[in-house]
Image: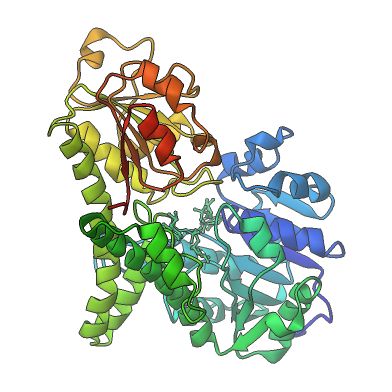
């Protein structure tokens, strides 16, 4: 019989060093100097970047992350590609691997692909020693804990496990702040000793009243529902942006007036080109799959509409651009400002810039794409198309629909027909529209899908302005 619990957690292993695993473990290590935290990832390149002496090369960009890494890396926070050894040393293991939407087979396009979670659970079952607490951190469909448990318990080794669900609610771009001052910590499970040991970690910096304990299924479902509610708010205000445009109302004024109602609240009511990011769409699709699985087709249809509005919003923005440019963008130069799915992150997963750029390229436009943190390589991967460079030959330059990566906005607007703001990066707020109007090809348009630009300055610079939701 395996000795069940150590009195104190000494070693943590986190499997998966991505946008969730990396920042979360950095904050745990920073707050728990007496615990050794090791992040393991099978992606050797990613681990190399986490260990890079040049902190600007960390694989994840998050404000405040570099400072924490500087403080704790190689003290009590380690990054390694030796997965098995670190599993064997751990008292507690966080599963923080990717769970994308399935693209083939049963549940394709809706259900989460649990290939990585399953592979991970098998590896833990094989390599763990003694009694180990296994914590689900990845966003996963409800009842995944059951799968993880079954895999862990089916091995014949002299080890045992307690499985807990502890979903992460951080938002990218504010991850460090969200981790240091969370609204709540949610822990689901049956094993009370394991729950207390995990709570002990968070108690080091989170108030006891914010640590919620539930059964494992409530915890898993709460994560999906929190994301579904947030996404629903974004789709709601985006649907309102369209009504404002046709009625002459102003969506910012409506959003403010509605948000002043304390029952509704003023957060998450900013209209935009649609929600992006790795979680919202995936989680709602998961919820829809779950509803259909249990025969709740009306409930499934209700949530489907949140995604439909999101797709429609991206579509109508690209169509508005084409329409304003006299129905054709062929060979027209258009500047795309922002490629990440929101400001302060280098993540482009489900970014609305991808679909809008692809559609404009498909119409024959020449895009000049700028983003403070997203690389040209990443954009090429997302658009499935290489950029034009100084070395491009004339055949490439004359292609139907092209794009170029720009890093400097000075003199970038020469002969440009349109500027589209898609990501709310701060640097775009204070552009010199007077100077830009000297460079562009009139009659040029400025499309602000985030409502971060100064409309009056744009109009007084003799540029045409279109603001999302401004009637
Ligand atoms: C989200 C949840 O907020 C977080 O709790 C969960 O853990 C993961 O999913 P994230 O996707 O990182 O976080 O960012 P979030 O700030 O929620 O933004 C998601 C998308 O909605 C972005 O594209 C953002 O621009 C958009 N959005 C958000 C709006 O368009 N308007 C808003 O008012 C808020
Ligand atoms: P998230 O946004 O949820 O953090 P990411 O895709 O950024 O998702 O990160 C997940 C990480 O998990 C990736 O770096 C991937 O290489 C890693 N990973 C997936 N499966 C395994 C596994 N079995 N062992 C180790 N690492 C894994």
State the image quarter where residue 404 is shown. top left
Q: Is residue 9 left or right of residue 229?
A: right
Residue 137 image position (x, y, % from top left): 57, 68
112 vs 271, nearest the viewer: 271
Q: Is residue 43 left or right of residue 323?
A: right
Residue 361 image position (x, y, % from top left): 23, 32
29 vs 254, nearest the viewer: 254
Q: Which residue is located at x 85 percent, y 51 percent? A: 75
Q: Is residue 258 left or right of residue 318?
A: right
Count of labels in the image: 0
378 vs 272, nearest the viewer: 272
Q: Which residue is located at x 73 percent, y 59 percent? A: 27
Is residue 236 among the parts visible in the rendering? yes
Residue 350 image position (x, y, % from top left): 37, 51
Is residue 84 among the parts visible in the rendering? no
Residue 38 image position (x, y, % from top left): 72, 56
């Amino acid at each position: 019989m395996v000795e069940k619990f150590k009195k104190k957690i000494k070693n943590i292993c986190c499997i998966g060093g991505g946008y969730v695993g990396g920042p979360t473990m950095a904050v745990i290590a920073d707050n728990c100097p007496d615990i050794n935290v090791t992040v393991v990832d099978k992606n050797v390149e990613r681990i190399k970047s986490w260990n890079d002496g040049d902190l600007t090369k960390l694989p994840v960009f998050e404000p405040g992350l570099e400072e924490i890494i500087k403080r704790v890396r190689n003290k009590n926070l380690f990054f390694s590609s030796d997965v098995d050894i670190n599993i064997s040393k751990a008292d507690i293991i966080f599963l923080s691997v990717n769970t994308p939407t399935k693209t083939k087979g049963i549940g394709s396009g809706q259900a989460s692909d649990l290939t990585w979670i399953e592979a991970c659970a098998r590896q833990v079952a094989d390599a763990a020693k003694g009694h180990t607490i296994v914590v689900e951190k990845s966003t996963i469909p409800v009842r995944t804990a059951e799968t993880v448990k079954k895999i862990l318990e089916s091995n014949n080794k002299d080890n045992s496990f307690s499985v807990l669900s502890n979903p992460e609610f951080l938002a990218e771009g504010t991850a460090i702040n969200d981790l240091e001052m969370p609204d709540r910590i949610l822990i689901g499970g049956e094993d009370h000793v394991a729950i207390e040991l995990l709570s002990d970690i968070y108690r080091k910096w989170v108030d006891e009243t914010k640590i919620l304990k539930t059964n494992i299924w409530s915890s898993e479902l709460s994560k999906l529902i929190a994301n579904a509610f947030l996404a629903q708010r974004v789709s709601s205000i985006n649907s309102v942006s369209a009504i404002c445009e046709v009625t002459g109302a102003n969506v910012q004024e409506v959003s403010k007036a509605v948000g002043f109602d304390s029952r509704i609240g003023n957060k998450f009511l900013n209209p935009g080109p649609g929600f992006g990011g790795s979680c919202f769409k995936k989680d709602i699709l998961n919820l829809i799959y779950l509803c259909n699985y249990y025969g709740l087709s009306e409930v499934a249809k209700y949530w489907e509409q949140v995604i439909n509005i999101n797709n429609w919003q991206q579509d109508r923005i690209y169509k508005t651009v084409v329409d304003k440019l006299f129905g054709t963008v062929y060979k027209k130069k258009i500047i795309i400002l922002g490629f990440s799915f929101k400001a302060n992150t280098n993540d482009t997963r489900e970014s609305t810039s991808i679909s809008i750029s692809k559609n404009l390229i498909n119409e024959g436009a020449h895009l000049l794409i700028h983003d403070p943190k997203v690389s040209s390589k990443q954009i090429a991967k997302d658009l499935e198309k290489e950029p034009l460079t100084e070395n491009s030959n004339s055949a490439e330059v004359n292609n139907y629909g092209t794009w170029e990566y720009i890093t400097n906005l000075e003199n970038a607007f020469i002969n440009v027909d349109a500027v589209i703001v898609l990501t709310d990066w701060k640097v775009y707020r204070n552009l010199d529209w007077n100077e830009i109007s000297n460079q562009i090809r009139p009659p040029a348009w400025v499309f602000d899908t985030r409502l971060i630009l100064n409309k009056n300055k744009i109009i007084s610079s003799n540029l045409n302005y279109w603001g999302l939701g401004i009637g």
